[in-house]
Image (cartoon, grey):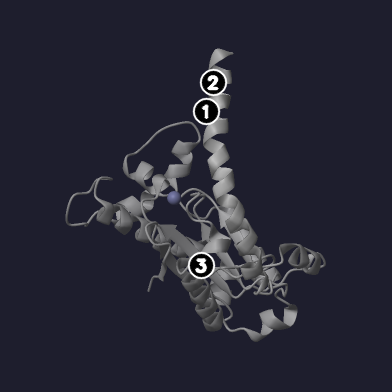
Amino acid sequence: MLYNNSFRYILLITALPLFFACTPQQEEEPSEIMETEPVSDVMTKEDQEALTPEEIIERLKEGNERYINNELTLRNYQEQVSKTSGGQYPEAVIISCIDSRVPVEHVFDRGVGDIFVARVAGNFVNEDILGSTEFGTAVAGSKVVVVLGHESCGAVKSAIDDVRLGNITAMLSKIKPAVEMTDDYEGEMSTDNNDYVTEVVNNNVQHTIEQMRERSSILADLEANGEIVIAGAFYDLDTGKVTFLD
Ligand SMILES: [Zn+2]
């Protein structure tokens, strides 16, 4: 009890000056925010049909530019929620790691109804994620699939270190092929070497894309017909920048 009381007292005396210091600023900020009208438009069927896969990749790159410049689009989310309640026409499917430092919608500056996002530690594909991607493209009309790896991926590092723990063991077996693909790496092949980890991350993205083509005739056909583009990308944890891989 004594601890609690003194803690509350400390909180009070430290919070009071903070409150007074903040008050004048709070009065100035709203007028600045009010100058920009929040975006309430959403992707329509017509928008989705009109865009080419190349244009969509360009739009994703532009969205990422806004993210790294701290210029995310101001959105009226409730309006977007209401406008998308009857249907969705997203432009892309993003397959990402679950890493909390890769907030996918923000990374590409996208709002409600804009993109499908499938997440699993280590951004690989299994039957379920392949099915989800087939739905996103063949059924729901998205024209781009992005497999997004990221710097210093914990799942990739665990695969390198051959971690064995519960269901994580089976999960990591899906990433192991990327470790084998990096066998010819010249240099220190350990998780202490960021460059090596990045190499495995990029090979994992490549392997995921190959798996899509091998295990999904729907995706392979859509790609062969030029109806979709499957692209790999790398997210830099230091800057937030997404680099599309060749
Ligand atoms: Zn990760």
Q: Which residue is mark 2?
A: 6
Residue 1 position in % (x across, y down): 59, 13
Q: Which residue is mark 3?
A: 146
The outermost residue toward the top is 1
Q: Mark 3 vs ligand 1: CB under 8 Å?
A: no
Report the residue at 58% width, 57% height from top.
Answer: 25
Residue at disc 1, secondary structure: helix
Report the residue at 82% width, 67% height from top.
Answer: 86
In front: mark 2 or mark 3? 2
Cβ atoms at labels 1 and 2 below 8 Å apart: yes
Q: Of the residues under marks 1 and 3, which one precedes in the sequence?
A: 1
Q: Which residue is mark 1?
A: 10
Residue 149 position in % (x across, y down): 43, 59
Cβ atoms at labels 1 and 3 below 8 Å apart: no
The disc placed on residue 201 is none
Amino acid marked by disc 1: Ile
Judged left or right of residue 96, residue 138 is: right
Q: Of the residues under marks 2 and 3, which one precedes in the sequence?
A: 2
